[in-house]
């Protein structure tokens, strides 16, 4: 199995990545997907034929870690390396904690990039990082209760409604929201929900009120 799936929506980047792989690793074959739905469809139908996956997190149909988590649910994460344009430490920590193979930056020097690809293609263990401090990066964590309360916030509930639903005081609810926002580096509760969804700590979900 020498097939590499490149998930990238920018044609120039996708084609350049494919050309580089074919030049430097002539035994490889490449396939390009340009959005989340096509990626999931291909992996469901041809997954066993895909040896490695280079995944851009920001393709159409994906938000934050949504596509990465979909691949994780499908069991594809151990042959997937994130290839992105920005060094987001929180996301890198989540990716590493979930067992993905690496987190590479598109801005890497070409020699460093090729060496990282070689490790990715030739080895099946170890995390391939994009920065010298990758070993120091820890995933962002929030408690189960904080996640539960943020889900209510996501669905449009105010503190009084959340407190009633969970048999808590309003003050306790607000404290949990404040603690979650602090852990996520968020400026307010809505921002906390947004970051939690991007980090894969909270699903986009459905409004439980049926609105």
Image: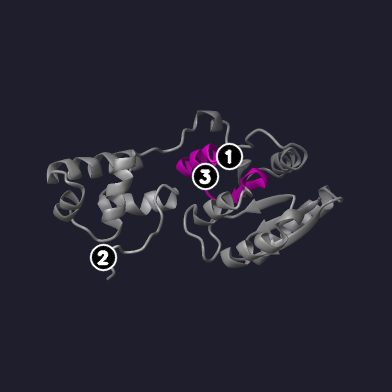
Magenta part of the chain:
77-99
Residue 94 part of the magenta-drawn span: yes
Please, is residue 121 above or below residue 134 in the view?
A: below
Residue 85 part of the magenta-drawn span: yes
Question: In the rendered view of the protein, which quadrant contains the C terminus?
Answer: bottom left
Q: Which structural element holds mark 3?
A: loop
The residue indicated by pointer 2 is 209
Residue 16 as seen in the image, left or right of residue 134: right
Picture coordinates of residue 155 (x, y %)? 29, 60
Q: CA–CA distance between discs 2 and 3?
A: 37 Å
Toward which corner of the image does residue 123 lie, by quadrant?
A: top right
The residue indicated by pointer 1 is 99
Picture coordinates of residue 208 (x, y %)? 30, 62
Mark 1 vs mark 3: which is more N-terminal? 3
Q: Nearer the viewer, residue 49 or 118?
A: 49
Seen as rendered, the residue at the extreme bottom is 211
Residue at (33, 46) in percent of width and height: 147
Mark 1 residue crowding within 10 angstroms, few (<14) / some (14–19) / many (20+):
some
Picture coordinates of residue 134 (x, y %)? 55, 33
The residue indicated by pointer 3 is 87
Residue at (31, 53) in percent of width and height: 151
């Amino acid at each position: 199995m020498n097939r590499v799936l490149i998930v990238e929506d920018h044609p120039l980047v996708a084609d350049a990545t494919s050309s580089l792989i074919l030049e430097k690793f002539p035994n490889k074959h490449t396939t390009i997907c340009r959005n989340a739905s096509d990626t999931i469809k291909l992996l469901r139908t041809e997954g066993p034929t895909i040896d490695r996956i280079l995944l851009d997190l920001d393709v159409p149909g994906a938000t934050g870690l949504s596509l990465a988590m979909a691949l994780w649910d499908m069991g594809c994460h151990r042959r997937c390396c994130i290839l992105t344009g920005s060094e987001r430490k929180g996301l890198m920590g989540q990716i590493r904690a979930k067992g993905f193979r690496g987190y590479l930056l598109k801005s890497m020097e070409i020699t460093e990039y090729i060496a990282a690809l070689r490790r990715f293609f030739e080895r099946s263990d170890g995390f391939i990082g994009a920065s010298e401090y990758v070993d120091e990066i820890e995933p962002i964590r929030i408690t189960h209760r904080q996640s539960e309360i943020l889900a209510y916030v996501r669905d449009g509930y105010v503190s009084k409604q959340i407190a009633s639903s969970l048999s808590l005081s309003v003050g306790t609810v607000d404290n949990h929201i404040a603690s979650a926002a602090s852990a996520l580096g968020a400026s307010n509760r809505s921002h906390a929900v947004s970051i939690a969804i991007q980090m894969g700590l909270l699903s986009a979900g459905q409004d439980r009120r049926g609105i």
